[in-house]
Image (spheres, rainbow, N blue to C red):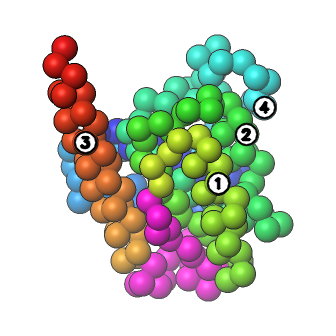
Amino acid sequence: MKIVGLSGSKVGSKTRTAMNYTVKSVTEKYPDVEVTLIDLAEYDVQFSDGRNYLDYEGDTGYVAKTIMEADAIIIGTPIFQASIPATLKNIFDLLPVNAFLDKVVSMLVTAGSPKHYLIAEQQLKPILGYMKAQIVQSYVFIEEKDFYRKEITNDDVLFRIERLVEDTVVLTETYTKIREAKEADYGF
């Protein structure tokens, strides 16, 4: 199983901090899972211009291909101005409409206000649904008060991250078994 952790912003540290905890949880609990962390702050991803994702080169091609090859994606995003960052939206624009078909996608959201929890519900989930993702319904919402000096200080948040990882892996395994059973029914 391949999981990509996608830290969806070029600025700030909280989302990356939370994604580091998430990737650590995956590697500790599921050592057989291949996990890759893509922090968009470390890549020079160009704006989508409508080409097929396979036609992009460099960082843009690497990021798009790595996401497309994954079985599951854990998206980490901050909330800026009551919306997802443009860098994350650009990733969605680079990929085909069916990019998340047969993929499990889970979410981790960092925000400065508790009022921003609806952004995942009203913006992110519809985009992922449109792109055919199997969405892990519960997501981790982390507020500013849960961080101190680039560390998560709220034990409940750490527990929710571990649960998100577990739900992502279990759902991915479940959907894989269902698809394999359906394909076996065809008999060729």
**Could you give the CA–CA distance between mark 2 and mark 3, rounded to whole angstroms?**
32 Å
Q: Position of residue 127 (x, y in %)?
A: 65, 49
Residue annotated with mark 1: 126
> Start and end of the magenta stretch?
136-157
**Could you give the CA–CA distance between mark 2 and mark 4, rounded to whole angstroms?**
6 Å
What amino acid type is highlighted by mark number 4? Phe
Name which of mark 4 and mark 3 comes first in the sequence: 4
In what element is the residue under mark 3? helix
Residue 139 part of the magenta-drawn span: yes
Residue located 25% across and 42% down the image? 178
Residue located 72% across and 81% down the image? 115
**Could you give the CA–CA distance between mark 4 and mark 1, rounded to whole angstroms?**
21 Å
Residue contact at pointers 2 and 4, CB within 8 angstroms: yes
Q: Which mark is residue 90?
A: 2
What amino acid type is highlighted by mark number 2? Asn
What amino acid type is highlighted by mark number 1? Pro
Name which of mark 2 and mark 4 comes first in the sequence: 4
Residue located 76% across and 23% down the image? 50
In what element is the residue under mark 4? loop
Image quarter of the C terminus: top left
Name which of mark 3 and mark 1 comes first in the sequence: 1
Name which of mark 2 and mark 3 comes first in the sequence: 2
Up-down: is 105 above or below 109? above
Q: Position of residue 20 (x, y in %)?
A: 46, 59
Name which of mark 4 and mark 1 comes first in the sequence: 4
Q: Which mark is residue 47?
A: 4
